[in-house]
Image: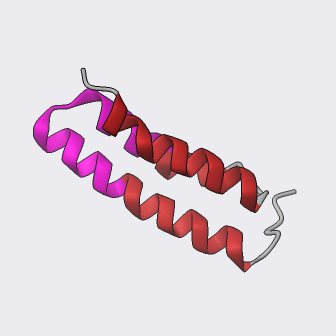
Amino acid sequence: MFELGSTAVLMWGLLFGAIGVGFCLYGKKQRAVVPLCVGVALCIVPYFIANVYVLVAIGVTLTAIPYFVRV
């Protein structure tokens, strides 16, 4: 059912997951909602995307959200 397309999907997923953990820790410590939600999304999203280009596009977009959205 879930098939890994290539090693690139695994590596990008690992990178975005690590960034997501960092956002989660930062959001929890600073009590900031946006980085916390983005961190959770970055930890979960790589499990459901098998295309490398889509994964990178969504990962970069999610990573940039806390920079542009200040709540």
- Pick whichever, 65 or 38, lies toward us: 65
Q: Is residue 37 magenta?
A: yes
- Vertical arrangement, residue 51 with respect to residue 38, above or below: below
- Pick whichever, 57 or 46, lies toward us: 57
Residue at the outermost top position: 71
- Pick whichever, 47 or 55, lies toward us: 55
Q: Position of residue 38 (x, y in %)?
A: 41, 39
Q: Position of residue 24 (x, y in %)?
A: 30, 47
Quarter that holds the C terminus: top left
Quarter-of-image position of residue 30: top left
Q: Position of residue 43 (x, y in %)?
A: 48, 51
Quarter that holds the N terminus: bottom right
- Pick whichever, 2 or 52, lies toward us: 52
Q: Residue at x 70, y 48 (%)?
A: 48
- Left or right side of 44 for 7: right
Q: Magenta-highlighted stretch: main secondary structure? A: helix
Q: How is the image coloured?
A: secondary structure
Q: Residue at x 38, y 34 (%)?
A: 37
Q: Position of residue 58 (x, y in %)?
A: 61, 45
Tag count in the figure?
A: 0
Residue at the outermost left position: 30
**Range of the magenta residues?**
21-41
Residue at the outermost front position: 68
- Left or right side of 48 for 14: left
Quarter-of-image position of residue 69: top left
Q: Residue at x 19, y 40 (%)?
A: 28
- Left or right side of 56 for 61: left
Residue at the outermost bottom position: 7
Q: Residue at x 69, y 74 (%)?
A: 8
